[in-house]
Amino acid sequence: MDDLLFAYAESPVGLVEIGCSGVGLAVLNFVEEAHHSPAVTPLLTDAARQIDAYFAQKLSVFDLPLDLRGTDFQRRVWAQLLTVPFGQTATYLDIALALGNPQAVRAVGAANGRNPVSIVVPCHRIIGSDGELIGYGGGLWRKEWLLRHEGALLL
């Protein structure tokens, strides 16, 4: 990750760290404080603008080049996450079935948990088969907030 430059965006659910390579967005996660000196590049500026628009409910689909770093299986799972539309959810089993391997539910969960680009690659939209909110690296309270923000949770 030495080749990444970082920026930060404030959000209603905490500070968002944005990391980009020369290829695309490689990191987007919640942090308590900035860990890197902020940089300014067109891609970082655009990513921060799109994150701000998402939280302002002015954007539901991101348009950013991605530099997803992980195993082949992880990248396949993350590609499936990108098919879950704004305001909707899918289960870990749904993702495993889409990959053609219904026995891979736990592996899908592990790959989902390793997603380096939260929100943009919407791992928060993946829920348990019983509808329970499980497994979110940013904290379940953020997952719930994000799903309510998108209208996927009404209660």
Image (cartoon, rainbow, N blue to C red):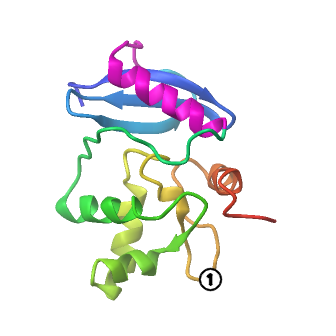
Whether 91 is drawn above or below 43: the answer is below
Is 32 positioned to the left or the right of 113 in the image? right
Identify the magenta region: 36-56
Residue that appears at 29% across and 42% down: 66
- Residue 60 drawn at (x, y percent): 55, 47
Asked if the stretch drawn in magenta spans residue 102, the answer is no
One can see residue 35 in this view: no
- In the rendered image, which residue does mark 1 sit on? 130
Whether 89 is drawn above or below 15: the answer is below
Q: Main secondary structure of the magenta part?
A: helix
Residue that appears at 50% across and 61% down: 85
Residue that appears at 66% across and 35% down: 56
Is 17 positioned to the left or the right of 13 in the image? left
Residue that appears at 50% across and 26% down: 49
Query: In the current view of this chain or complex, which residue is farthest to the right?
Result: 155
Is 49 positioned to the left or the right of 19 in the image? right
Which quadrant, please, contains the N terminus? top left
Quadrant of the rendered image containing residue 131: bottom right
